[in-house]
Image (cartoon, rainbow, N blue to C red):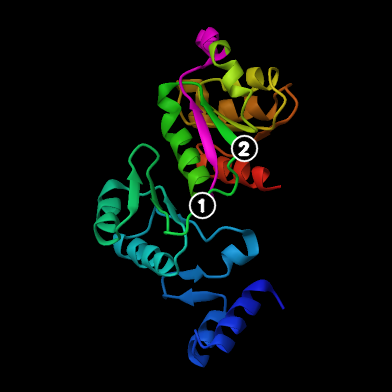
Amino acid sequence: MNTYTTHILTQLKSGFLSIEDAEKQLKGFTDYGFAKVDDEREFRQGFPEVIFGAGKTTEQLKRIFRHLVDQEKTVLATRVDPPAAEEVSHQIEGAIYDPLGKTLLYKPSGYTLKNEQKKIGVICAGTSDIPVAREAEVTIEAMGHQYSSFYDIGVAGIHRLFAQLEEIKKCHVLIVVAGMEGALPSVVGGLVSMPIIAVPTSIGYGSHLNGITPMLSMLNTCASGVTVVNIDNGFGAGYSASLMLRV
């Protein structure tokens, strides 16, 4: 018997759930027709289902968001357009929209940091890469961890990186976001001893190929300890870095 089932049966035995509600919850998901919300996700993976906002209607987003809020969970939605975010924020007190990262975050009253001693450093090469960095940072916050931001320290002015290197070395995991030729993770990887998650962005000129060039550069890095996520995947980087801190 898994922990989710035990939790539901305990609530049933204590009288907090009716037999009908317990039956519904034991399925592990709630079916709205357009979406089957994974109620068991937090018990399996340590964090509730994250809502991917792109392609969803405002009504669909609101319905899923409200479902998770009513369960007193931390709720994160990514790739949310401003009009949809405004609608959700208007109806759900405490939902905060970050227009740069296009994230919508709700933290319940019981929100606490999972680790107050360790933090994740989020480095981005240029100002144009900040939206992807912000998606990573809000994800880190949602998962209960701390981060430090190091913006606009790309290799075109490498002295800017060296000026912040001592602060960067105080972090326990690094996320390095870069477009153009994607050189920054390799440079950082040769200077530090902690794990690095590299994020290629779709920022650059012609032969940059909308992120494929920096992605290939990062995958072929000669610096040890660099892991690469997909193009513009700030969420994936923030999620993975947060899991590293939980180990």
Distance CA(mark 2)–CA(mark 1):
14 Å
Quadrant of the drawing holding the N terminus: bottom right
Asked whether 49 or 57 is in front, the reply is: 49
- Examine the rendered structure and indicate whether residue 168 appears above or below residue 228: above
Q: Residue at x 37, y 43 (%)?
A: 102
Point out residue 236 in the picture as x, y percentages from the top left corner.
Answer: 56, 44
Residue type, label 2: Lys
Residue type, label 1: Thr
Point out residue 215 in the picture as x, y percentages from the top left corner.
Answer: 60, 30
Check disc 2 and report the residue beneath it: 118
Q: Looking at the rendering, which quadrant does residue 229 occupy?
A: top right
Q: Residue at x 44, y 36 (%)?
A: 134
Q: Looking at the rendering, which quadrant does residue 231 occupy?
A: top right
The kind of secondary structure element at disc 1 is loop
Q: Would residue 70 be counted in the magenta stretch?
A: no
Residue extending farthest to the bottom is 19
Asked whether 9 or 223 is in front, the reply is: 9
Point out residue 4 in the picture as x, y percentages from the top left corner.
Answer: 62, 73
Asked whether 40 or 115 is in front, the reply is: 115
Region rendered in magenta: 143-161
Check disc 1 and report the residue beneath it: 112
Badge 1: residue crowd in 10 Å (few <14, some 14–19, many ≥20): few
